[in-house]
Amino acid sequence: VTLVPQSGVRSELAALLGESKVTSEPAACAAFAVDGKSPACVVYPPSPEQVAALLRYAADHELAVLPCRNATKLDTGNPPQRYDIALSLKELNQVWHYEPADLTISVEPGMKFGDFQYFVARHRLWLPLDPRGGAKASLGGIVATNSAGPLRLRYGSPRDMVLGLKVATTEGKIIKTGGRVVKNVAGYDLGKLLVGSYGSLGVIVEASLKLFPLPAERATFILRAGTLATARDLRRRILHSPLDPLRLTLLDPWAATLVRAGSREPGEAREHEVWIEVGGSTRVIERCEQEVRDLGRAAGSPPQRLARTETGEAEKFWARIADPAAWLKDAYPDGVVLRTTLPIASTEEFLNRAQQEVESESVGLAGLAQVGTGMVTLCLLEPKRAREFSGLVLRLRRAAEDLGGALIVEHCPWEFKSGIEAWGSAGDHFEVMRRVKGVWDPKGILSPGRFLGGL
Amino acid sequence: MLYEYDALSSLRQPDAVVFPRSTEQTVQIVKLAARENLPLVPRGAGTGLSGGAVASQGGILVGFSRMKEILEIDIENQRARVQPGVVNLDLSLAVSDQGYYFAPDPSSQKACTIGGNVAENSGGPHTLAYGVTTNHVLGLEVVLPGGEVIHTGAKFWDRPGYDLTGLFVGSEGTLGIVTEITVRLSRKPEAVKTLLATYDRVLDATRTVAAVTARGITPAALEMMDGFTLRAVEQATHAGYPMDCGAVLLIEVEGMREAAEEQASEIEAVCKENQARAVRRAETDEERELLWKGRKNAFGAIGRISPSYYVQDGVIPRTRLPEMLEFIGEVEKRYGLPIGNIFHAGDGNLHPLIMFDARDKDQSQRVLKAAQEIIAKCVDMGGSITGEHGVGIEKNELMPLIFSADDLAMMHRLKEVFNPRGRFNPGKVLPIGKMCGELRVQVSAGGEV
């Protein structure tokens, strides 16, 4: 290992990537701060090969690298143990191999999700995801964090949509896994390791993805549920009905209020609400409406209908439901967002226990449950003091684990992070994961310490 | 002797065959093999088509026919927990009354096991809409070569950490031995419509495939058989396929009643625009089953008319099907061997069947060369060497066609994390550098896809 003084790193990186692709300006570096730590420099490699060259350089000099684009999800994870270089993937922004008739596309990681959706929408296609960060999220970040929101019910997560990846490794190579066709079992499915690895194994420099036809029309219905018991009844009825919803979310009373207001305004107190989005032709949507009406009547809840199109009011609300941290953090700067994954039958019970846990604390709770997939987001709105926060999170995590699930801290003020492991505890598979990390990143330079158990 | 074969025959027998009844017994076997430094090959029903379950280097063959319990059915959570020897179709039958099924449906589903499906990441006709095995597996219990037992994934999605489940699925038993599987159960659709479109020319059938996708319709299944194959099938199964046409498409759409109906009508229109001679709908469940029976037994039917055949599993972008069909026609002529075409057309997964007589040395050589040309063409088109049958010992030397030395080195290093001495299913998946001029494997009739 050759340890290079900070000033030396900057000039060596400039020699490697070009003068304009490296900066150590304090303001630029501060913009990439993670959990209170700023990098010594920010790099903007203009090609996959240069990403690989950068990683090789960083590995040779044991410099810690965090890959990122728009920083929409960097709040998730443990604080980095070390942080020398922010690797911005902004300049990797190309589309390759777009075949609308094959429903496949290959894209570089820096492309923004909003631009991507706009690009494929002209062929009435989409990547049916509602990831954290929404339009501002990047394709690379979405894949690296396996970010999926309510649409997961119908379409799955990035794990199900990635056909192949090109990955820059800390050895300075670009390796390929999978391919560009929709069915492929040649070789080990290394892509699965990268999806959801939060930048801890390698840097995705190209992703080949499956696309889907856009539904002709969409409609959202809202059913009121006085109690969690009614909500559970509704969930069972909906999932056993012929309806094949795109999204299905249970909002607790505070979440229902906040989603509508989009800010801190108290608004009118609401009940639990079940939101259902369906898609298809006019005829299909009419039939869905009838089904929802019948289900609601059977459970004692007449439905309310929201606007029909994707550009309408409903889409604004669904975006808030998909990423509460994005807008809550302005209204509640000390807010905490926890993401729980559970067996789906436990979702209502978990909301119930969470409510009980916060009752004795001076904390507001808004709960949003994707009841068809078991993903539950809890927003703790006034946690105030770090010590209280960590105790409460541990109790909520225990509640989730008792119900057969897991809880991660998706977003919290970084000062709170020292008291809690973001990902929870690992199981008997951890030693294997540690060895997998060792294969990809033997020097531990990629997002060091941020992933499960400090991987 | 019997365990010398799967649907792909090999040339070597295992030294011993064992049938554990539990994870604990599997651990004991694994430890014994470690002590004695013996290869270990897991095996389900032996329906695989790439030699994944044959002990090509001897050693202990671990059969899972006594680990066939469905351990848990949890309908409300849409999950089941099964032992690896559970037959694929048996799981679907067990939950059918409650309106659920297990989505991956390889054509051998009456015999093949879920453990085998996990090892091969099996597909099937309906994976077009619902994804292959990996999209339906959430968790595994795995015995590693040292005898350690680990649990990957969970009943819920996204257990924090690396997706080891996703790495194990499709690793063909080379990373660990799976002793328990947690799968997702899918809800049966309200309505299913099955259509049979017949064509004079195979070219028009392949054009229809791309046109259906381009219309924004995702059928649940979209299968193609050429005239040669369907005549063999019709003689064997009497499914009601017309004997005189150039190709048929078997298309299925499902979902809410209204949605299935609309899609079926649209597909009918697309077929007619592409010169379909006729489009018939299965009116009853019996009729639908009969149409599928013909498709699922196609390989057996070919076996009746040819002493041997070699089946391939290449994948191409589906829009290139017409071009590929033409190319296969040329290969057929050039090598003087009949080729039947039976495709999972909707996802571009080809199963050309090259017919030959294995007793004829010259024919055997020509088969290999013809097969190589077709695979090379798939790769040229941006495709893959295998869509669902796996690599095994059949295609491991073809891996360099689609992966660089660096790609393969990474796979090799990951394999070493789990299986450093290579005793688990040795000689499979990754190339071992022994390209030989003769058929390393000999394919006979009886396999199903």
Image (cartoon, coloured by chain):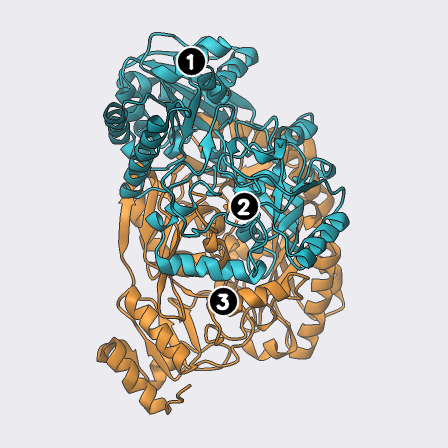
| Spatial CA span between label 3 and label 2 | 21 Å
Which residue occupies 72% across, 58% down?
A401
Question: Could you say where residue B254 lies in the image, as x and y percent from the top left?
Answer: 49, 26
The hue in which chain A appears in the rendered picture of the protein? orange
> Upstream in the sequence, badge 1 or badge 2?
2
Q: Amino acid at mark 3?
A: Val
Mark 3, residues whose alpha carbon is within 10 Å: few (<14), some, or many (≥20)? some
On the image, numbered disc 1 is attached to which residue? B232
Q: Which chain is displayed in cyan in the rendered image?
A: B
Residue B172: mark in rendering? 2
Mark 3 residue element:
helix
On the image, numbered disc 3 is attached to which residue? A439
Q: Nearer the viewer, mark 3 or mark 2?
A: 2
Dividing the picture into quadrants, the one containing residue A229 is: top right
Question: Could you say where residue A379 lies in the image, as x and y percent from the top left?
Answer: 60, 62
Would you say B392 lies left or right of B175 here? Answer: left
Question: Could you say where residue B432 lies in the image, as x and y percent from the top left?
Answer: 44, 52
